Amino acid sequence: DRPIPPKIPEFSRDERLRHVIFSRQFSADMLDDLAETADKIRSLSKVRSGQDFLINLLHHKRAMLYFTQPSTRTFLSFMAACQILGITCNEVRDASTSSETKGETRFDSIRMFSSYFDLIIMRSPVARLAEACAYLMNDLSMSGNRSVPIINAGSGADQHPTQALLDVYTLQRSFQFTSPKDSPLGTRFDEVRREHPEVTRGLSHKIYGFCGDIGRGRTVRSLAELLAGYDGVTLAFVAPDHPTLSLGDDLRARLLARGVRIFEVDSLETPIDGKPLIEQVDALYMTRIQKEHNVAADEASFAAIDFDRYKLNRGLVARMKSYAPILHPFPRDQHFGEIPPEIDADPRAMYFRQARNGMWIRAALLAHVFNVDHQISRFYHEQFGA
Ligand code: CP
C-alpha cells in the first residue's frame, strides 16, 4: 500500500473541504455554519415543500459507502443523509465480496469507485487508510484522472471526524438552552444561571469529561481536537493508568500546544479545582472498552484493573450538574455496562438524540462538500423568513 506523507495535507479547495479526513480540519466557525445548515435541513424535512426541495438538490450525485468494518449508526445515518438530499447510494460492506479477494489492492478498489461514483464514504480497520486515499485522489486530480472527495467514516483507532461533528452539534444544541428536547433543562437558562452563575451559552469555558477507553477511542481523539478550538475549555480524561487505555502522547502534545487545560485521572471521583470531577463536568462523554483491539499482552495486564470505576450508575449521575448532558458515541457494551439502561430516562442522557443528530449533521456535511449549502439557506429563508 502507498506510503503516507508525513505532513497533514490541506484537503480543501476554495475555502471548502474537499476531503474530510481529520476533525482538526474544522474551525469553530465552520462548525457553527454546519450546525446552522443541519438545523435548516431538519426544519425543511418536516414540510412537504422542503422535502421536495432537498431531494432534488443532489439527485444527479452517487455515493459509494465502502465500509469494511462493522457499523450501525455511521453507515445508516450517512445513507439516510444521502437519501434526504437525493444522492443515490451503493455499498461494499465486506471486502470478501469484492475483487480484493482476487488480489486487487484497496487503492485500485478506490480508483474503481471513483470511476462510477461522485463521493466515497469509507470506514476501515486500517489506520490512516482514508488519509492515503485522499492523497491518491489528489494525485489523480493532478494528472487529470477522475478524482472524487473522500469522507473518513472511521479509520482504525486514529480518527472518526464525522462522529466528532455530531458530538459537537449535540453539545451546541444542548448549550443553547433553547429546546426542551436537546437540553437537560430545556429552555430554563435563567434557572441554570441561578444554580450555576458561571454558565454561559455555547461550548467555550466548559469542563468536558471523557471516561473509559481513552487510548484507543478514535471518537475521543477526534472530539478532543474539535473542542480544542473553543476558548478556555478544560478536558478531563478518566481512564485506567495503563499504556493502552490512557491518553496517547501525540494527542496530549497537540492539545497542550493549543493551550487546552488537561487533567488525566483514574476515577470520576478524583478532585479537580477542589471538587470531585463528576460534580464539575459540564458534559460527560462515556466510551466502551474497545475489546476488538485487545491483544494477548493487554489481556494479562488488564486483569489488575478495576473497570467498575469507568461505569456510570444512578448515584454518580445524581451528583452531576443538572444541565450536563451525558454523551456516548455508541455502541455501548451491554456486557461491560458503562451506561446501564437505568440511566436512559434521565433528562441528561443525550446519547440517542446524539445518534439521530448524526443524520442531520452528515446531511449538512454533504451539502458543504457539494457546495449546495447556500441554496439550502436561500430556500429556507424563502419558506420560513429570517
Ligand atoms: N458511533 C459509531 O461510529 O457507531 P457505529 O460503529 O455503529 O457506526
Image (tube, rainbow, N blue to C red):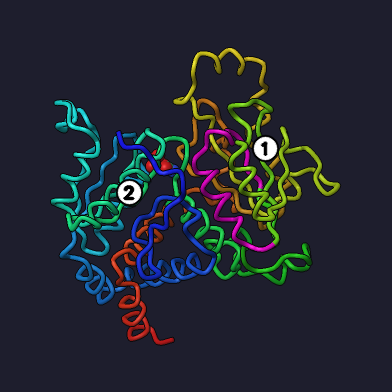
Tell me the SS state at disc 2: helix
Q: Mark 2 points at which residue?
A: 135
Q: Residue at 33% across / 34% down in the picture?
A: 69
* Tag 1: amino acid: Val
Mark 2 is surrounded, within 10 Å at the Cα level, by few (under 14), some (14 to 19) or many (20 or more) other residues, namely some
- Residue 223 located within the stretch drawn in magenta: yes
Q: Looking at the image, is 358 positioned above or below residue 251?
A: below
Tell me the SS state at disc 1: strand
Read off the magenta span. Answer: 209-231
- Residue 329 located within the stretch drawn in magenta: no
- Report whether residue 76 is seen: no
* Tag 2: amino acid: Tyr
Q: Judge by depth and name the residue closer to the eye, 197 or 231.
A: 231
Q: Name the residue under label 1.
A: 238
Q: Judge by depth and name the residue closer to the eye, 142 or 29.
A: 142
Question: Which residue of the protein is positioned furthest toward the right in this rendering?
Answer: 274
